Amino acid sequence: MNDCVAVIGSGVAGSITAAILAKLGSHVILVEKAQRPSPLVRSFRRGSSLCDVGFHYTGGLGDGGFLRLMFDRLGILKRLEPVALDVSGFDRIVWPENGRELRVPSDNAAFEERLCEAFPSSEPGVRKYGRAVHSIASSHPFLNPTIPPWEMALTPDSALSLDDVLVDLGVEPALIDFLGSYGEVLYGLNAREVSFQLHCLVLGSYMASVHTLRGGGLALAEAFSQCLSELGVAFLGGRAASRITLDAKGHVMGVVLSDGETIAARTVVVTSHPGSLLGLLGPQAMSASYRARLEAIENTGAMFLSFVRVPPGTLRDLQNCYLFCPPCSTHLGRTRVLAVMAGAPCLQGDTPCRTVMHGVSDEDISWLRSAPPEPDYVSWKKQISGLAVDCVTTGLQIRRDALEVIDTATPRTLETWTGSPGGAAYGAKRKLGQRALRPRTPIGGIFLAGQGLLAPGILGAAASAVVACSHVAGADAVWRALFR
């Protein structure tokens, strides 16, 4: 392959897409509105503290795992140091109202046992649920790369929701609420919205292996940057794509940048939010039905992040805590503390910060997007951070003065970084019952990738990149280059 390919967006999906196509011989130009690649997963420092924005842990990095094999073949793995989380309980679930607690192990059989202990009246259903998670996860190419990708057609998306399956299994409502709330944090969909298959794939990836990286998201962003340079990818930072041009037959001709320069390209892979196609193409470039599909995209909920300095020994290292507590009222709406994510093992000289993630109301999002006055905005940030710290100290029974908020990232901040409307945590929903967007679009030469296409998170974004590249370069060529 010698054609020029333009990749729009240098997040996980964009960086991996660019690397794969460059490895296969394409001349790749990577366009990014931020100055440096991978802005979402790129951590930032406040003094000696390292604040991780978009990476905490992932599946697929164990021996023979999808990410590990791909990162090795692309030359990324040699620049990373994966760190296995505690398999006996990498996630700690706490119900502050009644003092219940459950630790999630990275092992399917052990997870079954924990669920049976926590919900004893549901044991028969739990056993069937555990077998289904293992069966679906182990038979999918993105969790078991020994399976050829074309066999995915033999395992179509489930038409049943997680809620449908659990009700059919006869488990108690409290277990449905638990798995639904836990899943909503992991992939941004509640138990009625998420297909059972997607639930199994996400949770199954953690049951197979769960890792963080030494240095966190910053280490991943730097590894991507070095790999792209080594593969000859041309990175254009600080220069957003403003328009995709088409010829008279409706096929891609190139990409116009924000400074007016035009990149000639016959193939474009858009890895930003799929709705961005509406602004990149003129009104006559796509059919009314496809435009309607893009306009109808629903997005996952938004997150407000508080970066908190925690004294050593206050919380268990590399363990994430999820607080299932009632929403707190604010002067606009209601916010709910969701999780206290562990800071990744840091680079030399850095102190890890915990990331407190909390959901915000639709009223908050609407207000934030209307550009509220600065004093009100600052006051609102302090209020939400204060509520978060109060919930964390109460729920985890630690001293209030032990936590220090050193910075925040609001949904408005995340929208600026990612282009995801309203700062949606996982971008476009992959909701059960809606017509899914496909990597190959109806416009000749334009393809889509990103976590809203297949599955959320690092692994989902990487899988979407592989599928998009398979459409561009051929599935066999891509699989041969990465996994054989």
Image: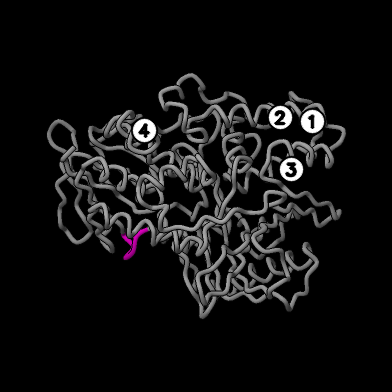
Mark 1–mark 2 Cα distance, whole angstroms, equals 10 Å
Secondary structure state at the residue bearing disc 2: helix
Callout 2 amino acid: Tyr
Relative side of 427 to 484, left or right: right
How many C-alpha atoms fall within 10 Å of the one at disc 3: few (<14), some, or many (≥20)? some
Mark 1 — residue?
171
Could you tell which of marks 4 and 3 lies nearer the N-terminus? 3
Q: Residues within 10 Å of mark 2 (few under 14, many from 20)?
A: some
Residue 129 numbered tag: 2
- Region in magenta: 33-37
- Visible in this render: residue 334? no
Q: CA distance from mark 2 to mark 4?
A: 31 Å
At x 46% / y 59%, what residue is drawn? 41
On screen, residue 73 versus residue 240, left or right, reads right
The image position of residue 27, as x and y in percent, is 19, 46
Q: Nearer the viewer, residue 220 or 421?
A: 220
Residue under label 4? 479
At 63% across and 41% down in the image, what residue appears? 207
- Checking the image for residue 178, the label placed there is 3
Q: Label 4 vs label 1: CA separation? A: 40 Å
User: What amino acid is at disc 3?
Assistant: Phe
Left or right: 334 with respect to 17? right
**Which picture quadrant has residue 244?**
top left
First in residue order: circle 2 vs circle 3: 2
Circles 2 and 4: CB distance less than 8 Å?
no
Compared with 421, 126 (above or below) is: above
Q: CA distance from mark 2 to mark 3?
A: 14 Å
